[in-house]
Amino acid sequence: MRVLGGMTAMAFALAPAMAAAQAAPANETWVHAGRLLDRPGKAPRGASTIVIRDGRIAEIRDGHAPAPAGAKLIDLSGRYVLPGLIDSHVHLDSDAGGVQALVENIESEPAVVAYRTAVNARKTLDAGFTTVRNLGDWTGATLALRDAVAAGTMPGPRIVDAGRSISTTSGHMDATLGVAEDLHAGIAEDNLCDGVESCRRAIRLQVRRGVDVIKIATTGGVNSRIGAGLNRQIFDDEVKALVDTAHLYKKKVAVHAHGADGINAALAAGADSIEHGTLLDDETLKLFRQSGAWYVPTLSTVNGYLERLAADPDAYPPAVLEKVKWRIGITGKALERAVPAGVRIAFGTDAGVSRHGRNADEFALMVKHGMTAAQAIEAATVNAATLLGVDKDVGTLEPGKAADLIAVEGDPLADVSVLTRVAFVMKDGRVHKSAE
């Protein structure tokens, strides 16, 4: 009896410790999802429980498992949960266009640009986009914000940044276009290159700044203030020098290109993605398939153009307006060819031309021009994560990955427009937008 009594006493003594062992750590969060699209491209799950520890997914259980004592419970049982969305093409430093953008660039001090960049980043995160690839700004504000977000000192999406975009002199990235000549001395031109050695140096200057990815242009652009068209504006050896040098430093290359000749030159040189890709020919589709490069259609630009023109018919100078009208009329035709051809497609909006915080408007345009809702969502999660090189951390919801997730009312696979109304946003296990 004394032994039994001793065991009983020991059990009572150990009870608090056993209860503590069963309690959840203070940094553990349990999420009850009504339905869960944990791996876009595959079938969704029903009611599920996501267990999050230290900002990462620890496990996913079927059904709504009761949270242990001490764990934080987030009830999304009435909502559809999916991975945080990814926009592969944004410009966080501005929301302006046309003549307004030119004036803004001249008037804005670097500190003003920095605050504007932070505001646009927060709009993007609130819209459910927890990761973005920023393809060009002038001041370095986005590079600085990237580091602040990574350190947890500023709210915003995870940022993959390209620094200053590169083109030849008088190409799409030449910021002196449309500016009086006597002002050129105050405009940075280290992103411009002419000839092989010059192009190699332009890449190295951006690498020195600490960029994650390289952005170049092989054709003219819609918003360029020069009437040189939208076809190729660079030689083969220059394109090869740009791509080869970037790859030497293990940096992927995103290529602004509209005309098929410029697209094909970039793909032949080994580009990793084509941005816009407005005109595709048979050779383009062949090169896409052979190279495995990604196509980022950026259809949302038309929304920005139409809204600005509705507010001000003179929003764009004549040389630009002609190209804007052309882009509005042709947008989506290339995607209609790319989808059945098996081209790999990643989601990107060119936000900054279109409005920040309305990135999800792109989904309806992708579906309108040949993609299913499931394909469009996969493009904004799995595909975009692979393109950006962050697929080990984001793009799907599975153990070991960052707890980046969003929740919406309704089924996005049935109606993709519900993604324009994101009710809940979590990034790295931290709630940034509550559904309550």
Image (cartoon, rainbow, N blue to C red):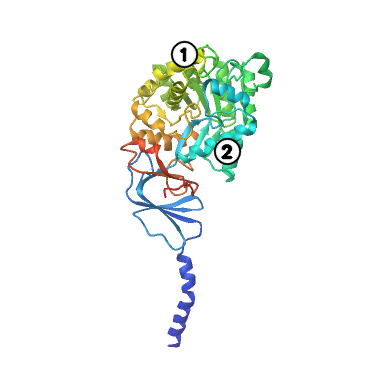
Circle 2 is placed at which residue position? 146
What residue is drawn where x is 48% and y is 67%? 20
Q: Identify the element where label 2 is drawn.
A: helix
The relative height of residue 198 versus residue 363 in the rendered view (above or below) is above
Q: Residue 243 at x, y = what percent?
A: 55, 24
Circle 1 is placed at which residue position? 322
Tell which tag, 2 or 1, sits nearer the viewer. Answer: 1
Identify the amino acid type marked 2: Arg
Identify the amino acid type marked 1: Glu
Q: Is residue 64 visible?
A: yes
Q: Identify the element where label 1 is drawn.
A: helix
* Figure disc tally: 2
Q: Residue furthest front?
A: 311
The relative height of residue 241 versus residue 95 in the rendered view (above or below) is above
User: Which is nearer the eye, 185 or 189?
Assistant: 185
Number of residues whose C-alpha sits closer than 10 Å to that of mark 2, classed few (under 14), some (14–19) or many (20 or more): many
Quadrant location of residue 371?
Answer: top left
Residue 361 is left or right of residue 388, and the answer is left
User: Which is nearer the eye, 224 or 358?
Assistant: 358
Q: Residue 386 at x, y = what percent?
A: 46, 36
Number of residues whose C-alpha sits closer than 10 Å to that of mark 1, classed few (under 14), some (14–19) or many (20 or more): some
Q: Residue 264 at x, y = what percent?
A: 47, 18
Q: Is residue 276 visible?
A: no
Quadrant location of residue 281?
Answer: top left
User: Which is nearer the eye, 347 or 43?
Assistant: 347
